[in-house]
């Protein structure tokens, strides 16, 4: 059995004051439990996470990483820098990065590789737009997105990634894929992992993201191939985030 994992994606939200309240609320709610959970925060707040969350069960990470190791890349953040702030995770290929920053499948794969090389766990996002779903291209699109990453990773590196299926039409819209719709795509992604490596198919957590909330989390996470969630909006309220962690 794969352990369930719940990751909050704060996106471009937060302030030192608000983060302090939110993180304290989550940590208090988790108590001494052994939750498998993390928050991915804006880079300027990684030090705050390191200060507040060290020694707690809540891990932290970033929302993007450079595909380069260092050098003249103004504004970018290297994987080694994320390690410097004791990050465990980094999201790569979120649809907002793909849409607003022109990130291609290949760039996303290079970012996943840079993260792994530094010892981070990349959370590789894949997902189709509404037009792609309506054109019945969902499996083709997410398959291509995942394959680009699998092609670049050697050997057992594939076993060390996390995949997040995030249908673009469900992100921040309040529309959620039904558990059956999500499960179908997750099963497809798992079989693509299996083509590469049986062990990877068993080990890799495939999270669902796209308006996962306390009231739909249980049903989604009961699906055989849904191993947790990547949570946007609901990760900004301690009570909601905790309720989703508890559902896991
Ligand atoms: P949402 O965002 O939960 O607000 O839909 C999920 C995500 O984009 O990671």
Image: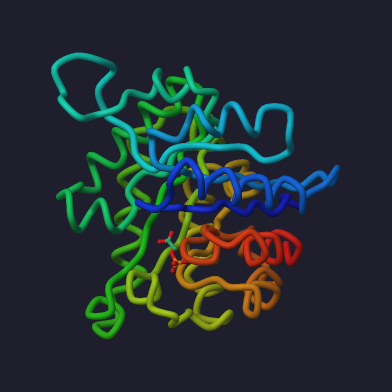
Color style of the picture: rainbow
Q: Nearer the viewer, residue 73 or 223?
A: 73
Q: Residue 50, percent across and down?
A: 57, 27
- 74 left or right, relative to 40: left
- The quarter of the picture where residue 241 lies is bottom right
- The quarter of the picture where residue 128 lies is bottom left
Please tell me whether residue 76 is drawn above or below residue 197 in the rendered image. Answer: above
The residue most toward the top is 71
- 84 left or right, relative to 12: right
- 107 left or right, relative to 82: left
- Indicate the quadrant of ligand 1 in the picture: bottom left
Q: Nearer the viewer, residue 2 or 240?
A: 240
The residue most toward the front is 17
Please tell me whether residue 108 is drawn above or below residue 142 in the rendered image. Answer: above
Identify which residue is drawn at 39% across, 41% down: 42
Identify which residue is drawn at 67% across, 45% down: 24
Q: Nearer the viewer, residue 208 or 180?
A: 208
Q: Nearer the viewer, residue 227 or 236?
A: 236
Q: Residue 150, percent across and down?
A: 39, 41
- 61 left or right, relative to 145: right
């Amino acid at each position: 059995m794969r352990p369930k994992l719940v990751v909050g994606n704060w996106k471009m939200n937060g302030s030192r004051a608000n983060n302090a309240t939110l993180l304290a609320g989550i940590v208090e709610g988790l108590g001494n439990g052994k939750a498998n959970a993390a928050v991915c925060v804006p880079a300027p707040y990684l030090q705050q996470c390191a200060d507040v969350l060290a020694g707690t069960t809540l891990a932290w990470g970033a929302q993007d990483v450079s595909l380069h190791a260092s050098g003249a890349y103004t504004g970018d953040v290297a994987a080694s820098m994320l390690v410097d702030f004791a990050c465990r995770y980094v999201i790569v290929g979120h649809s907002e990065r793909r849409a607003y920053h022109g990130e291609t499948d290949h760039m996303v794969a290079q970012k996943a590789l840079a993260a792994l090389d530094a010892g981070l766990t990349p959370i590789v996002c894949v997902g189709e737009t509404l037009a792609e779903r309506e054109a019945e291209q969902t499996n083709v699109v997410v398959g291509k997105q995942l394959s680009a990453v699998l092609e670049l990773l050697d050997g057992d590196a594939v076993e060390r990634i996390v995949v997040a299926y995030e249908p673009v039409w469900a992100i921040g819209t309040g529309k959620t894929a039904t558990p059956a719709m999500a499960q179908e795509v997750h099963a497809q992604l798992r079989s693509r992992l299996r083509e590469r490596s049986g062990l990877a198919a068993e080990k890799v957590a495939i999270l669902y993201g796209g308006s996962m909330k306390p009231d739909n989390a249980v049903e989604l996470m009961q699906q055989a191939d849904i191993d947790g969630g990547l949570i946007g909006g609901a990760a900004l309220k301690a009570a909601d985030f905790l309720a989703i962690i508890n559902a896991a």
